[in-house]
Amino acid sequence: MRATSETLEDNRIKLSVEIEEPELDEVLDSVVRSISREARIPGFRPGKVPRRVLEARMGGATALRAEALREALPDFYARAVVDTEVDPIAPPEIDITSGEESGPVAFEATVQVRPLISLPGYDGLVVTVPAPGVTDEELDAQIDRLRDNDGELVEIQRPAIDGDFVTIDIHGTDPAGEEVAAADDYLYEVGSGTVVAELDEQLHGATPGHILQFDAAPEGGPTLAFRVLVKNVQEKHLPEATDEWAQESSEFATVDELRDDLRTRLATMKAAQAKMALRENTLGELVKLVDDEVVPDVLVDDEVRQRVHDLGHRLQAQGLTIDQFLGATGRDGDALVEELRIESRGAVKIDLALRAIAEAERLEVSDEEFDEELEAMAERMNLEAGDLRDQLDHNGRTGAVRSEQRKAKALTWLLDHVGLVDDEGHEVPRSELEIEMDAEESVAAPSATAASDEGAETEEQE
């Protein structure tokens, strides 16, 4: 088989495929055997129907050849896609140009591919990330939280203010006069807002012995008549941040050692948050560089279908249906699809943008890198690498895997080159984030290519 490609207008490619007669005869014989196994003809066992009988049943040799070609052409098309390294995004339009009745066969397949977009400004992106440094104020707040854990409540006689703790009896009755809420000796922090906002308002300035009466509606419920008895008021006394306290409340001998440990932990946490923000905000800025007009609807539709499929699987694993999910979230099907469509359009824009960066920066995937990725995919899917490659070749998806790898390289390149500033616009040194993106972390957001195909293949295996 020989396959060549020609670029057409409107992001289409024409594949011209020629199949020599010996190769075609071998494939056609295989298809005929398959038809024979499925045929149910009196007097013949499945798989033992002679070819001349099949031809007679199907309207002659030409009709049988046409059926065999119909079965065989998708495999030849898939091989042509692999050979020409084309990455289609929609089903092909196939036209047999010669050989329908006899001899070698030639056909043309016209397919739509992704547009290679122009992406001005990608190399000058600046993104905002949380400042990874740890301030003394943040350390002081951490120390205060630890001191709060060791705080003691001390009864006081002054009126209650926010932050005090009061012991109360609280009762609520509905409009019918039935008591529907009650708690005695309930320890409540003034200003916490964990019951109803009106309770905090009433407790401001209250002292032991006060009886408070007011109406309020708990969230999602009817208005209740509340009656509250204030039994006592306490304030929390925190221990001094001394070395002795540090020894009793931590594994450290001094407050300075405790602060150093907290600083390290906070710095690690903030660096992780900054790295997450770096990725998310970079992709967000990248989306803005892609115009809606260049986004093919077929890619958006495919991405929507994939996301609906994934959502259905996740819900099924939780024992839920789509209808139950919609009811619980207060949405209808149209609203959900529209929400997914917006997300999908953004994902496709990221896909196109990363491919454009890979092309502009000449980022390529070596055969060694491809083989390593194939090994990793095969391990995840419990397959041999050779079997997986055969599957990818058979489905015409080998090029899609390479494309995903190029996108991963493009994202890594972009994350390494965007400018970083904090919320106040100050430059953030890249070293403070300690960016170490591995291959799995750097895979791009959209999944309407190799990733989704990998999942589909896994399901077929199961």
Image (tube, helix red, strand yellow):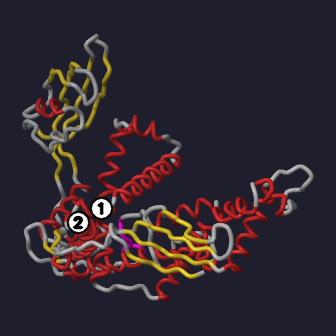
Other residues around mark 2 within 10 Å, as few (<14) / some (14–19) / many (≥20): many
The overriding secondary structure of the stretch rendered in magenta is loop
Q: Secondary structure at mark 1?
A: loop
- Rendered image quadrant of residue 407: bottom left
* Along the viewing direction, whichever of 195 and 396 lies nearer the viewer: 396
Residue 365: where, in percent of width, then height?
A: 42, 85
| Circle 1: residue type | Val
Q: Secondary structure at mark 2?
A: loop
Residue at screen point 63% across, 73% down: 383
In the rendered image, which residue does mark 2 sit on? Answer: 290
Residue at screen point 23% across, 66% down: 290
Mark 1–mark 2 contact, CB under 8 Å?
yes
- Rendered image quadrant of residue 72: bottom right
* Along the viewing direction, whichever of 95 and 414 lies nearer the viewer: 95
Check residue 295 in the rendering and tell me which mark sits there, or answer none: 1
Query: Marks 1 and 2: which is nearer the front?
Result: 1
Q: Earlier in the sequence, mark 1 or mark 2?
A: 2
- Indicate whether 432 appears above or below 455: below
Residue numbers of the magenta segment: 440-445
Residue 136: where, in percent of width, then height?
A: 12, 70
Residue 246: where, in percent of width, then height?
A: 25, 68
* Along the viewing direction, whichever of 196 and 101 lies nearer the viewer: 101
Residue at screen point 25% across, 13% down: 175
Residue 394: where, in percent of width, then height?
A: 59, 72
- Rendered image quadrant of residue 416: bottom left
* Along the viewing direction, whichever of 196 and 81 lies nearer the viewer: 81
Please indicate whether residue 198 sits to the left or right of residue 249 in the image.
Answer: left
Residue at screen point 9% across, 34% down: 204
Check residue 173 in the rendering and tell me which mark sits there, or answer none: none
